[in-house]
Amino acid sequence: MKEIGMEEIGPVRRRVRNALIQSGILKTSSRDVPLTLYTQDRRDRGLRVIGAVIDYLAPPLVRSIFQDDAPELAENSGRRVLRLIDRQIVARDDNVCQLTFAAADNAKLTPWHAGAHIDLHLPSGRVRQYSLCGDPRREREYRIGVRRIADGGGGSIEAHALEVGQFVEISEPRNAFMMPLPGSASAKKKLRFIAGGIGITPILPMTRLADRLGLEWSMLYTGRHKDSLPFLDEVEAFGPRARVRTDAEHGLPSPEELLDGVDGDTAVYVCGPPPMIETIRRGVGADSSVELHYERFSPPPVVNGSAFEAVLGRSGEVVEVGADESVLTALRRVKPNVGYSCQQGFCGTCSQRVLDGAVDHRDSTLTDLQREQGQMLVCVSRSKDGGRLTLDL
Ligand code: FES
């Protein structure tokens, strides 16, 4: 299912190859040239020799050629520009792609641990967060899995349209889903991983690590049907400890099924849609001996919300915010370009300035000073008393 394109040759090799063809040194037609000098096609010994020479010379001599078309970023921006070096479809329904990024000079990247994510700064200016799903031991690449959401905010569609060879800004990895290991940082003796659909992305590196360390672990991987499950082959390769369960075959899972085998010696790691996480939280209930870690990949439901009005201070337009929707959702109906990313109150992208009204701050990100200065994270925070909020928009 791997998609391969000429872009994968990389700029140096492409330029050298083209120069050799144009100068007549390399007598070949484009039809005969392997897609990449690393290709499985080993017929042309000359190309292999050229590839080896380029590999040897590239770091000291050709780095500037590699980098001359890479956009530059301000120092200490917390981001870097990486090149998309590989793109593969990883679900049978074709709706999930795995994107692999590397530095233009193939330098080592900032290390990360299982559970980490990066911000992807898309060419349109949209910012989206994706869990790293590769192997942290592969120090020169970051891999993410992206499910295409046809009726979402457009970020996943844009990510799917990225082309191999394209440069993209990416944040340094951050980890809000740490995995304290049994036997060292955790008093628990075994691990239970539960993934729903694309929620498999942070769970995969965790499971690989647990497996490699010989820890006691089990996994339940759920989704609507097998065709929609990304990385299915990789999960099934773990063997019987990783159980795949689909709604199409078995119906919606009960808390008992999701937590089968979980007891006070277990640390549970969950990533999936909010309803599944709520089911598990209810299933664990008051049993505080179970260590529960979870990460959502979509907004949490609004709890104890009441309807109110948000006023756009610059135009005077009034936006109705429903009791069960976020201010962000309501704003995007009239201002589709309002920026956002995590929709869970931790990235800060959606911050807006409040000109008037009392805010019920529901994030744990803004400092007291930022709140005093009128900032508000509209993806989670609301009006305090159901009164109007006027925003600097
Ligand atoms: S979108 Fe991340 S804090 Fe609101």
Image (cartoon, rainbow, N blue to C red):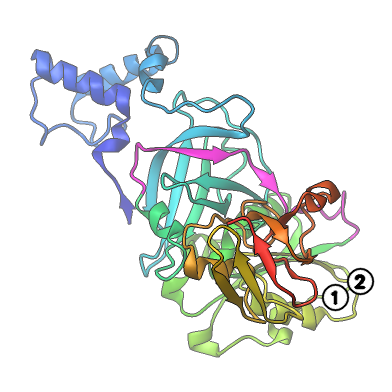
In this view, the residue farthest toward the top is 61
Q: Nearer the viewer, residue 384 or 232?
A: 384
Q: Residue at position x 56%, y 57% from top?
A: 314
Q: Name which residue type carries label 1.
A: Asp
Q: Is mark 1 within 8 Å of ligand 1?
A: no
Task: Inspect this view and state whether residue 319 appears.
Answer: yes
Q: Nearer the viewer, residue 119 or 268?
A: 119
On the image, numbered disc 1 is attached to which residue? Answer: 263
Distance between the alpha carbons at the discs numbered 2 and 1: 8 Å
Above or below 57: residue 310 = below
Q: Residue at position x 67%, y 49% from top?
A: 114
> Is disc 2 in contact with disc 1, using a CB cutoff of under 8 Å?
yes
Look at the image and say whether residue 197 sits in the magenta stretch: no
Q: Residue at position x 47%, y 46% from top?
A: 125
Q: Is residue 166 left or right of residue 274?
A: left
Residue 119 lies, in percent from the top left, at: 57, 47
Q: Residue at position x 78%, y 82% from top?
A: 282
Ligand 1: quadrant of the figure:
bottom right
Residues shaded magenta: 162-187
Q: Nearer the viewer, mark 2 or mark 1?
A: 2
Q: Is mark 2 within 8 Å of ligand 1?
A: no
On the image, numbered disc 2 is attached to which residue? Answer: 289
Above or below 364: residue 85 = above
Q: Is residue 358 left or right of residue 247?
A: right
